[in-house]
């Protein structure tokens, strides 16, 4: 049991009969309202609380010191006979008093534990670093921890969650009709993600010519039909363009939706770890990564943009599926902490890639998403509209089948975790969002 002495009296004149000895005990929260009334009734004749010394190091542990506490208490009880209950309650909360009670005339208070100065300094530094990095989600969580730990001598600074960053794709149907090379951002995208074939660089001009050839064929169907390599270059350029425009790359002071990118856009996160794409004839599946000039290149097999399930060319769901796979491989590029496991000695994981090797991620954790966790999250976000690209602008049947494809894809990854799989999702009655006029 801690001891504290509360001295109450008129300014400039203390009287022994107005001194109270208070035992600090854990009396919980349920009596807080009634106890506060008892305390105020006892102090009503004496409007000024001059000092409070808990004997627990407030002067050294807290920045406010005794003087400001005294000043604040004076302000809270400045009206003789009618103390400001709300202000006094706020002051008591600041001091760590959680509840007051009056058993048999002895006043008791529950006091929050006082953390060490070093702990508070570390939390405060983390809070400031998160704000500087515009990682407002982390800042909010750290701020709550600071407050709950009792590190604030004053109430926690007010926190207003920043607005969500704007998303630039409003109509995915019309967006995918634009040839990637006609986009103002194409030169930057091509520079950020150069393409190789079997490890050999393909010049930016050759890639641009190949993408243009595919765009011309899409518009006219005039021969010659694109080669498999040309079709791959087009599909990958359009996928990169989609990643670029899923966010407003110039937006600042806003919250990105992705829990794993450190408050930057998905595109910028990928550029931090991926230096390009390596299309390989000997690849059996997408993988991470081949390294060229100290940069990681995602390994891709040649592919076109057909989607046999929907019997249509270049659909949004094909680009989305590819995009999610690239995000998966980018997570691997961050290091061995994001390697797969076979869950041994538990039953083997599914053979995800059809190569006879069972692979899983250890656990689904939203605060630190694994490769399969990122794929699940993206498909779920497209279903719920957390990432909105204008699916409602697609023809109704395609919008419905696309949404169902995303639902099935997300749920398929639930078996890819050794423990704590994510929840199953279901398709909404209508595709997310409204198509702008």
Image: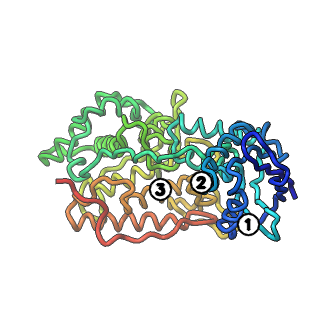
> Residue 142, can we see it?
no
> Residue 293, can we see it?
yes
Where is residue 191 shown, x and y percent of the image? 37, 29
In the rendered view, does 168 fall on the left or right side of 417?
left
Which is in the foreground here, disc 3 or disc 2? 2
Where is residue 286 shown, x and y percent of the image? 47, 49
The secondary element bearing badge 2 is classed as loop
Where is residue 16 shown, x and y percent of the image? 85, 50
Judge the density around disc 3: few (<14), some (14-19), many (≥20) Cα neighbours within 10 Å: many
- Distance Cα–Cα, label 1 vs label 2: 23 Å
The secondary element bearing badge 3 is classed as helix
Residues marked 3 and 1 touching at CB (< 8 Å): no
Q: Which residue is mark 2?
A: 84
Residues marked 3 and 2 touching at CB (< 8 Å): no
Q: Which residue is mark 3?
A: 375
Residue 206 figure quarter: top left
Judge the density around disc 1: few (<14), some (14-19), many (≥20) Cα neighbours within 10 Å: some
Q: Is residue 269 above or below residue 49?
A: above
Where is residue 359 shown, x and y percent of the image? 59, 59
Earlier residue among tags 1 and 2: 1
Residue 107 figure quarter: bottom right
Which is in the foreground here, disc 3 or disc 1? 1
Earlier residue among tags 3 and 2: 2
Q: Which residue is mark 1?
A: 28
- Distance Cα–Cα, label 3 vs label 2: 55 Å
Judge the density around disc 2: few (<14), some (14-19), many (≥20) Cα neighbours within 10 Å: some
Please name the residue shown 70% across and 59% down the image.
98
Q: Nearer the viewer, residue 56 or 191?
A: 56
């Amino acid at each position: 049991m801690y001891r504290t002495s509360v001295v109450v009296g008129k300014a400039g004149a203390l009287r022994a009969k107005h001194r109270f000895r208070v035992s600090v005990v854990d009396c919980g929260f349920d009596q807080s309202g009634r106890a506060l009334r008892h305390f105020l009734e006892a102090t009503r004749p004496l409007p000024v609380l001059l000092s409070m010394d808990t004997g627990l190091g407030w002067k050294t542990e807290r920045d406010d010191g005794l003087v400001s506490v005294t000043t604040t208490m004076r302000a809270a009880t400045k009206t003789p006979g009618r103390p400001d209950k709300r202000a006094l309650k706020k002051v008591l909360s600041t001091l760590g008093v959680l509840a007051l009670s009056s058993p048999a005339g002895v006043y008791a208070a529950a006091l929050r534990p006082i953390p060490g100065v070093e702990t508070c300094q570390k939390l405060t530094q983390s809070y400031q670093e998160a704000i500087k990095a515009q990682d407002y989600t982390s800042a909010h969580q750290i701020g709550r921890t600071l407050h709950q730990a009792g590190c604030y001598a004053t109430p926690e600074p007010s926190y207003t969650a920043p607005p969500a960053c704007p998303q630039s794709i409003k109509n995915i149907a019309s967006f995918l009709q634009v040839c990637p090379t006609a986009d103002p951002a194409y030169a930057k995208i091509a520079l950020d993600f150069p393409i190789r074939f079997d490890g050999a660089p393909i010049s930016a001009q050759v890639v641009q010519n190949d993408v243009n050839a595919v765009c011309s064929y899409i518009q006219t169907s005039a021969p010659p039909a694109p080669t498999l390599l040309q079709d791959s270059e087009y599909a990958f350029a359009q996928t990169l363009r989609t990643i670029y425009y899923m966010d407003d790359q110039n937006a600042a002071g806003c919250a990105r939706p992705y829990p794993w990118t450190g408050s930057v856009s998905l595109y910028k996160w990928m550029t931090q770890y991926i230096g390009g794409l390596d299309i390989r004839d000997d690849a059996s599946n997408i993988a991470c990564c081949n390294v060229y000039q100290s940069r990681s290149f995602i390994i891709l097999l040649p592919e076109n943009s057909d989607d046999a399930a929907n019997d249509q060319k270049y659909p949004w769901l094909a680009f989305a599926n590819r995009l999610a796979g690239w995000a998966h491989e980018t997570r691997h590029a961050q290091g061995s902490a994001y390697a797969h496991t076979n869950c041994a000695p538990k039953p083997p994981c599914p053979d995800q890639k059809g190569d006879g090797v069972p692979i899983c991620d250890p656990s689904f954790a939203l605060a630190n998403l694994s490769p399969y966790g990122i794929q699940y999250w993206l498909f779920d976000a497209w279903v719920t509209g957390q990432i909105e690209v204008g699916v409602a602008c697609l023809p109704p049947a395609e919008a419905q089948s696309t949404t169902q494809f995303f639902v099935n894809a997300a749920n398929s990854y639930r078996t890819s975790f050794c423990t704590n799989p994510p929840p199953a999702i279901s398709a909404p009655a209508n595709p997310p969002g409204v198509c702008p006029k």
